[in-house]
Amino acid sequence: MSFPLRPHDGVHMTLRIERTIRWTLVILGAITALPALALISPGRALEVSYGISPPSDPMALALLQHRGILQAALGAALVWAAFHPSVRVPAAVTAIVTKSVFLGLMATLPAAVSAGATPGILFDIVAVVLLAAVALHHVLTGSSGRGGGDTFGPDPV
């Protein structure tokens, strides 16, 4: 037995998809920004994120901390894209490129060296897949979010 679709079922599905995309971008953005903790606690942040101790070379440490700020900016862009559909594709593509470069660099390292970065590697693989899905959905549907434009309003019901 099948039930006929009611006219508003498509609207509910669209709202569910939009809510899922928003939450996905917020979560990916927040996790992407975590390397910024290297500014506050470089030892702990580098140990947790990459399984390494802070470098003894001050320039190398400064570069890692700078990388943390860039990751925070990328994370902020993903969170921004959650609420501004018009920037979803550029933010997603930027994140896909940067995460793919990281994955490529890690692939060139011996497994024993990159082992400490396994959580970050796994996160970036999942993130690339999810961000590609978000960008593809946006491109294929011409989705501009709820109400046809950017909004900071409440989540759709």
Image: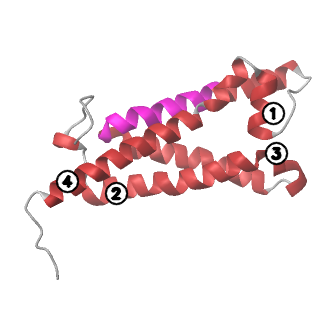
How many C-alpha atoms fall within 10 Å of the one at disc 3: few (<14), some, or many (≥20)? some
Q: Is residue 49 above or below residue 107?
A: above
Say if the magenta span includes residue 79: yes
Residue 75 left/right relative to 59: left
Q: Which of pointers 3 and 4 indicates the residue nearer the eye? A: 4
In the structure shown, which secondary structural element does the residue marked by tag 4 occupy?
Answer: helix
Quickly name the residue at label 1: 47
**Of discs 2 and 4, which sits in the foreground?**
4
Q: Estimate how packed mark 4 is, as few (under 14), some (14 to 19) or many (20 or more) residues with alpha carbons within 10 Å.
A: few
Q: Which residue is labeled 4 in the image? A: 12
Which residue is outermost to the front?
Answer: 1
Kind of residue at disc 1: Glu
Residue picked out by circle 3: 116
Residue 96 seen in render: yes
Q: Give coordinates of residue 68: x percent, y percent.
A: 66, 28
Residue flagged by tag 2: what amino acid is it? His
What are the residue bounds of the magenta stretch? 69-85
Q: Give residue 137's quadrant in the image.
A: bottom left
Name which residue lies at 86% across and 18% down. Answer: 58
Please give the residue where the numbered disc 2 appears in the rendered image. Answer: 137
